[in-house]
Amino acid sequence: MSARRLQLLLLAFLASASSASKEIATHLIITPQSPVIQIGTNFTATCLIADTTEATADDLYWNISRRIIPKNQYTKINESALSVTIFVNDEKPELLCCYCNKKSPYVFKNKGKFIHGIFLTKGYPPNKPKNLTCMAPQGKLYISEIFKCWWETSGYHTQEMPSTYTLHVNVIHGNAYNVSTEENSALVKMDFPAHMELDIWVVAHNQLGTVESEHLTKDAFSFVKTNPPYVQVFPEEKFPPSLLITWKHPIQPHYLILKYEIRYCLNGSLDWMKVLVVNKAEERESYRLQNLQPDTVYVIQVRCKHTKDGYGYWSDWSASVTEKTPEDRPTSKPDLWRIITEGEGTNERKVKFICKEPVFSNGKITSFNIKIQTQKENVQNGSAAWERVPVNSSVADFFPRQTFTVLKEISLLDKRPVRVHVTAVNSVGMSPQASLGIPGKTLELGPVQGLKVWPQGGQLFVKWNAPNNANVAAYVVEWVNDFCMDWQRENRSTLQTVLKGSIDKFICYKISVYPIYSGWTGQPATVEAFLEEGAPLEGPSVRPKDKPGRNEVELVWNEIPPSKRQGFITNYTIFYSSRNGEHAITVPANTTSYTLTSLTSNTKYDAWIRVSTSRGSALGTSHSFITLKYAPGQMEMIVVGVSLGFLFVVLTTMMICLYKKDMIMKNFWPWIPNPGESTIGHWSPDYPLKPETPKENCLPDISMLDVDINDAKSVFEEDKTNLALKKDKYLSEEHSSGIGGSSCMSSPRQSVSDSDEGGDVADTTASTVQYSSVVASSGYKGQTPCVQPQQVIFSRSESTQPLLDSEENPDILVQEGSRQSQLFHSAWNQDSARSSEFNQLEMEPQEVLLSLDLCPLEEDSELTTPADGQSAPVPSYRPQLCGYRPQ
C-alpha cells in the first residue's frame, strides 16, 4: 500500500508539471533521488514513466556501474513503474540507472533511448567513542587555561561519509563548553574551575545516525598534571654510601599538595630502583639515598603528582642528575690469576701473576700487596714477606687492550708448587685477601669434561661438565688471542656461562676452562672459537719447493696469519693452468704442500691457491714455473743406455765371430785345396792321365817367378790366346775354385766345360779338367828348397775346370819360368794395378782365362815331396798356383 501511495503522489506531481510535456528530457524518474545507503544492507529504487505512452514498464531495465542487473531482482508495480532491489556490499560509490529499450524521436542523445540515474552514497553509521580522557596541564605557576581531551574511535568510516565528533565540557552549576572536530582529540579553552566538578562527554554523528560516549564526571583537580620538579644531588662525606637529593615544588603548596617519586640506577644501566616520598604534615623538599655502593656513579630523576589517590597525573621525570658516591674500603677480593710459559732451563716454568681490581673496589686502587709462598718457605720461615706493587701502568706492552696489572714474574720448577696471596689498597683501606695455588706440573688435578663453545645472539656461550673430582670450589674461564687476554670466575654450581668481556668478530679465541680445587688450579680444557666467521682477508702465496721436474712439481705455501683468517679454514683449492687448460685440486685445511703430477714437459704453468672458510674465500698471488724438457738424470740414462746397447752389440758381434769363425772364414776367406796334398798325375795332352798319389806333407820344389808389372799384361794376353777353350763354351757360375791353397782369392767358382760333342761333363773323364801345379827348381826370394833332383812336375787333379796353358804345354812353362819369376815380384807389390787388369779382363763377355797367383803359405808348415817322401822345411811364403779368375 505504501508503494502504491508513493506512486500516486508522484503521478500527481508530474501532472502538475505538464506544461512542457512535449519537451520533457527522458520521461523517466527514479525514487529516491539522492539516497544515503548503509553498507551491508538492501536498497530498493523505483523507476516511473511520466507523461508519455511511448513506453511501458515492460520496456524498462536497470544498470549499475555499466552492469545490467538480472531481471529476477525486478518488481513490476504497474504498467508505468518498475522497482529493483540490490545488496550494497562495498564502499565504492556507484551510479544506478533506469533505461528504456524503445527509441524516441524526441531524444537525440544515448542513441534515442530514455535514461535516468541516481548516485548511491555509501557509508557506515558512527560508533560510540570510548576511553574518554582529559587533562589540565600546568602553565607557568598555575593550571593552564587549555583543557585537553582525547578518545578512541571504533568501527569503519568512508571518505564520502565521515563522522564528526563534538566534545562537551560542562561545569556543574557553571558554564558549558563544546567543540566539534573530525579528529579523535579536541582542546577547550576555559578558566580552570578549581574545586568544582566537570561533566565531560563526546557525541559522534554522520548522515546515517548519532551516538554519544559515556560521561566523565570528576573533580577538576583529577585532571591536573604539574611540571616536573627541579632536582639537585649532593654526596655526603659523613655517610659514604649515601647521596642527598633536594628539589623545588613546581606549583604553590597552598594551591595543590603533591607527592614525589625518586628513581636511580648505576650510570649506564637501565635497571631503575624507585623510592616514593609522600608529604604529610609538612612539605618535604629533600631525601637521602642510603646503602649505595661507594665510589659509584648514579643517575637520579624525580617526578610528582596530586597526593590524593585517583587525582591528577604524574608529571614528567625531571632532568637526569649524575653524581658519584664517596670512596670506602674495598669490600670484595681482587681477581688474581696467572700466566704460565716455558722457562729457559729444563723442567722450568715462568709464572707471571696478574690481577684485576676488586668488583667492589669502592674507590681507586692505588696498590696491591703480594706474598708468594713456596712449600720450603712455609716449613722454614712460617710465612713469606709482603711486597707492595703500585698500580701505575697496565700491561699494554703484553696485551694492548687489557688493563689488569702484572704483579710479579718468577721462575718455578715443574715439580715445585707455589701459593700466592694478594690484597688491594685504596685511599680508605685494604680489601679482603685473594689466594691462588699453583701445584707442581705433575700434580695438577684433572680437567673439566665435554667443553663446548658456540656463538649465539652476538655472544659466545661456554658449556662444560664437572670433572670427576667433586672437590671443585670454582671455575675460571679464560679467553686469549693475539691482542688481548681476559678471564672471569664462575661458582662451583655453574656449568654454562657467557663470556662477559669484549669479544670481537672474525677473531679466533682460545677458550680454556680451569677447575679450582680448594684454591689450587687444575688442568685446563681448551677449544678455539669465533664469535662470527668471515671470508679470509688474503690468500696464501704459493711457490715450488724445489726446481720443477719434467712431469711433477711440489708446491708449498705458508699458513695465513690468524689475524687474517677470520674463520676456520675448511680447505685449500690449488689452481694451475697452461696452454692446455685450467685444472683445480682441493686439499684439506691442514695441508701446506702438494705435489702436482701428470704435467706436460717443457711447459709454462701458472699456479695459485684459494683458501676457504664457511663464509667465503680469498685468492692468493700466482706463481709461474716451467717444467723440464727431460727429467733429472734422464739424459744420463739415455747416454748410459745407448753406450750399454752399443757395448752389448759389440760384445755380441765378437761372440758370434768367435763361435762362428769357421763359417766366417769359409764365406769371406774360403779354404782352397792345397795342390800339394792332392793326387796329381803327370799330364800330357797326348797321353792318358796317370794318377799318382803324392805322399802326405811332401811337396816338390817350387820355382819362383818374378813378374814385372809391365809384363803382367802380356803374360795374361798370352794366356788368353793360348787358352784351348772356346769363348762360348764355358760359363762362369757363382762357385769357382782356384789352384792351390790360397786365402787371397775370392770364393772359388766352378766352371762347366762344354765339349764339342755336347756330352755330359759329369759322365765322362774326357771332359774332366785337372788342377795343375808348377814346381820350380829354384827357391823363392832366396829360400832354400828341398834337396831333390830338380824337375818339372805337372800334377793335376780331376776337375771340371779348364786347363791352364802350362798344363797343356809343359815345355812352354819351363821356358817361360825364368821370365815370369823375374816379373812376379813386381806384380806382387803392385796388386792394385793387377786388380784393375783383372777387372778389365772380366768385362770381356764369354771369355774365361786362368791367371797365376802367388799366395803365402802358413808359417812352419811342412810339405813332403813325391820323390822321396821325406819332409823338409819350407819357406814362410811360397808361390803357388792359386787358381783362375774369370776374365
Image (cartoon, rainbow, N blue to C red):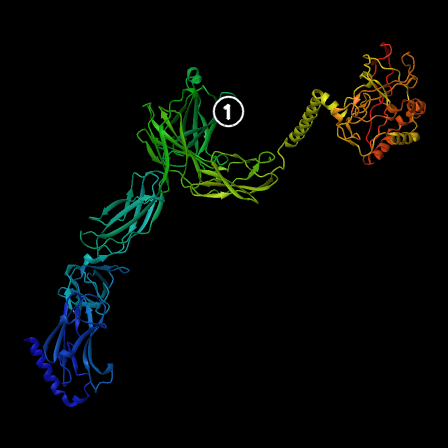
Which quarter of the rendered picture does the C terminus lie within? Answer: top right
Residue 295 shows in the view: no
Q: Position of residue 391 (x, y in %)?
A: 46, 33
Residue 719 shows in the view: yes
In the picture, measured across the screen, residue 725 lies left or right of residue 248, that is right
Q: Residue furthest left?
A: 1
The amino acid type, in three-letter code, at marker 1 is: Gly
Above or below: residue 263 compared with residue 366: below
Dot 1: within a 10 Å radius of its alpha carbon, few (fewer than 14), some, or many (20 or more) residues?
some
Q: Position of residue 353 (x, y in %)?
A: 45, 28
Above or below: residue 1 compared with residue 608: below
Q: Nearer the viewer, residue 219 or 65?
A: 65
Q: Nearer the viewer, residue 853 or 420?
A: 853
Q: Nearer the viewer, residue 606 or 746?
A: 746
Q: Position of residue 311 (x, y in %)?
A: 19, 54
Which quarter of the rendered picture does the N terminus lie within? Answer: bottom left
Residue at image position (8%, 81%) is 8
In the picture, measured across the screen, residue 679 lies left or right of residue 114, that is right
- Which residue lies under the disc numbered 1? 343
Question: On the image, which quarter does residue 5 sit in?
Answer: bottom left
In the picture, measured across the screen, residue 649 lies left or right of residue 330, that is right
Count of residue discs? 1
In the picture, measured across the screen, residue 535 lies left or right of residue 122, that is right
Q: Nearer the viewer, residue 387 or 638?
A: 638
Question: On the image, which quarter does residue 265 sit in?
Answer: top left
Q: Position of residue 682 (x, y in %)?
A: 85, 18
Residue at image position (43%, 24%) is 371
- Indicate the secondary structure of the residue bearing disc 1: loop
